Each structure stands twice: as structure tokens, then as C-alpha cells.
Amino acid sequence: MAAETFGGNTVIIDLGLARGEPEEYARPARSTTPDWFAPVLLAVIVLLSSAASAAPPPPALTAVLTLPFGPADPYTLTDRGDLLAQTYGTLSSYDLGDGRLNWQAGSASPTYRLRTGADLVLMRPWSGNQGDPGTTAVSLRTGAAQWRRSGNVVTIPGSSALLAVSGVRSSGSGRRVQGPVDAVGPATGTTRWQVTVPSTAVLMGVPGPDDSGPRMLLMHDNRTAAVHDLDTGRLLTSAELPPADYGPDNPSVAGGLLVLRHPTPTGRMVTAFDPVTLQQRWSRPAGYAFGVSPCGTLICLTGPDGVRAVEPGGGLQRWFQPGWRSIEQRGATVIAYGTPAGETDPVGMIDPATGQVLVDLHGWRLVSGPGGGDHLLVTRLVDSGSRTMVAAAAPGGARPELLADLPAGTGDCQSVPDRLVCRESTGELVVWAYRRKE
């Protein structure tokens, strides 16, 4: 570097390395940046890359299938993971997993309710006062029509047996029958055996010994209880039970016993009978109890004064809750309600052994169906009914876990594990995949 002065002005001339500038000025032997710069730069690059590559979490609700659906069209969810829906007489089956159409059956008379049993769809059109419309069976796997026969074909919970009965119109629930009871062959629809009811009787299933499966009980109006084998129709045992108002819910099966509410000269009683032998096990005062419900391994007596749980071994009281009015059991889950009907005003998910509330459900309404096995789905109207929230209730959480909002006008929902199906006010049926928080 040199400086020259010309006419009072100084000019700087770069002479280069050849004129004495040390070589390390251009190529220094040591780094001129701080030691911490490289690690910090690498960390920033990693953070930016991670933020750019991290996908947002999937939504709690994702629509899998949307169908045009009328307000009176029936639908149901099957144990095989399918959706059955009937629109204008056309019956369709969809896979709940991906929304794929499995099959469509030809036009049939609309029915108000879809029922399944023995791998069949049992369709019985509503007939009003026009006589017996019969029952049509459609294959649950292919949609092909299998057979049609007279009578209302019903099922026994826990059994594949099909029974064709003639109901008593005034009974309401359809459990009171009259005339012949026919066992129906699932493949052909023909009668395998027949038991005749001379007058009327209440038909129900009762447990068999050990794990042998259920049996058929006919509680005749002459107070004779008759237990029949479901494979052959053979009469296994019979006994005369106390006078009672034998209705759709009396007697009941709870705690593995046949439980009857009946009057006596000293007051109303609750008496338990062995469902295999019909021998009396125990009897205790009924108090104000008007209902009997399964309650885990216990028996719950429900009435206007509360819910009391008694032991099936001897009828001794285990616990009592005066603020409750009814009990519902869904699989291994037990729900307590503050109303006798057991449809609205749930108190909570309870421990049936102690009567303690596990999950508070005040203000929520249960979605019908088994839910997710270890949890149930519940909904709640907020903002004056303009918004519907859906949540999952499971033991371990004091309150339901919020999932998402449903579209306005959503109702008539059913659920199975990982799927929620709801009717929309826009005239659609929507299948949602729901996802709980990790």
C-alpha cells in the first residue's frame, strides 16, 4: 500500500502481496468466526427443518361416508363393522372402516326398524291394522333374499336361535306372545320345532348352567314358568311362581338369577329364583322398587326413593344411592340416571361394586351403541342448542374428554369403536371416524 500526493489530493495505491503485505492477511491461519457459531447455526437448521416437516395433528372427527337420508329412514350398525341403511325401500350395506358399499338389495317394503340375527337382516314392515306382514330375511353378507315367512321373527340375546312369534298387540314391548312359538332354521326359514302357548305368555331368555348358553323361558299367564331348550324345544323344567303383574320387565334377569317383583299379604317383595331349576334362592322386601336391573355382578333395585344394589348370593344390600332413579348396563359399563326412564339426565359412569361415580355425566346425553369398548360417546347441546359437542367418557377421567363440535342440527347418533354415525338436519347420514387424544 502506498500513498502519493498530487495537487493537494492524496491517492492510495494497492501494491498487492508482492510489495510486502503479509500472506496470512489474505489466508489467515486461524478462523476469524467465534467457536460457538457453527453449533448454533446447525441447531437453528435442525429446528427449522423439524418445524417444516412436522405435520399438524389429524382432526378429532373425519367424515368417512355421507348418504342422502330421509327423516324416517332406518339404519343400524352391526357387530361385523357394517352400516345398514334403508332408503325408499332399498337396503344398503356399507363398510364402516372406509365407507365402501358392500351390497344393495332390491326394493322392499320400508320398515321402521332394522334387526339382525344369525347372520341375517330380519325385515318386518310396519302394517298398522292390516294383519301379519311376515318377516323377510336378507343375507347380512351378500344382501341376497333368503326366505320369507309369517310371524315376527325375534332373537334371544347371546344365542343364534330365531323364534317366530305372534305378539299381543296391547303388550307394547312385543315380549308378550300368544299361539305357537316356532324355532326357525336360519338357512331355510322353515320351522324346526314348535311350542304352543295356550293363552298368552312373556317370552325371554334365561342363563343356562355354566357356559351352556341361554334358554327360553315362557312365563304363562297362569303363573307357570316353563324353561325350554333352544335347540330342541324340549321342556326342561317348570314351576308355579307367586302371583304378580307379569309384564315386559317382570320378571327380569340380573346377577345370573331370575328376579320377580310381587305382592304379598305383608307387603311387596323381591324374590330371586335359580334360572336353571326355578327354585327360590331368597326373598326380601321390595320397598318402593319398581324395577330390577343388572348392575355388574350385583342386582340393582330402582324406585322413587333411589337405587339399592343387593348381592345375588342372599339379597343383602351392598350400597344405596337416594338421588338415582335407574340403572343401565352396556357391556361392562354401568350408567346411573336421575330419571326413571334411563334415557336422559345421566348421573355418571359408576363402579357397580361400590356405587361410586367414576365419570361425571351431568348435562351430557349418551350416544346409543357400544361405543369404543373401554369408553362411551356422549353429546351435549350448547349455545342455546345451536352447537353440539361430542366427547368420550372413560374410567380414569373425572369428566368426558372433548373431541369436537358436530354440525348444527345433528341428532339420532349411534356409535361403535372408532366410528360415530349421525343423522343431519340437511337430509344426510354421516359416518365419522373419531380420534381420541393420545
Image: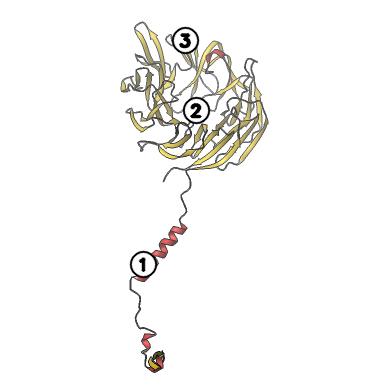
Q: Secondary structure at mark 3?
A: loop
Asked if residue 313 lies left or right of residue 214, the reply is: left
Residue 4 at x, y = what percent? 39, 93
Q: In this rendering, which labeled residue sits more in front, label 3 or label 1?
A: 1
First of labels 2, 3 by sequence position:
2
Of 422 and 382, nearer the camera is 382
Q: Amino acid at mark 2?
A: Gly
The residue wearing badge 2 is 158
Contact between marks 3 and 1 (CB within 8 A): the answer is no
* SS class, disc 1: helix
Q: Quadrant of residue 286?
A: top left
* Residue 427 picture location, percent across and down: 59, 33
Q: Which residue is mark 1?
A: 40
Question: In the picture, residue 162 is in which quadrant?
Answer: top right
The answer to whether residue 41 is above or below residue 154 is below
The residue indicated by pointer 3 is 223
Q: Mark 3 or mark 1: which comes first in sequence?
A: 1
Q: On screen, 99 above or below 118?
A: below
Q: Rounded to the nearest whole Å, what is the CA distance between mark 2 and mark 3?
A: 26 Å
Q: Position of residue 401 (x, y in %)?
A: 40, 39
Q: Can you tell which of label 2 and label 1 is closer to the viewer?
A: 1
Q: Position of residue 116 (x, y in %)?
A: 57, 29
Q: Say which quadrant the N terminus sits in.
A: bottom left
* Contact, mark 2 vs mark 1 (Cβ under 8 Å): no
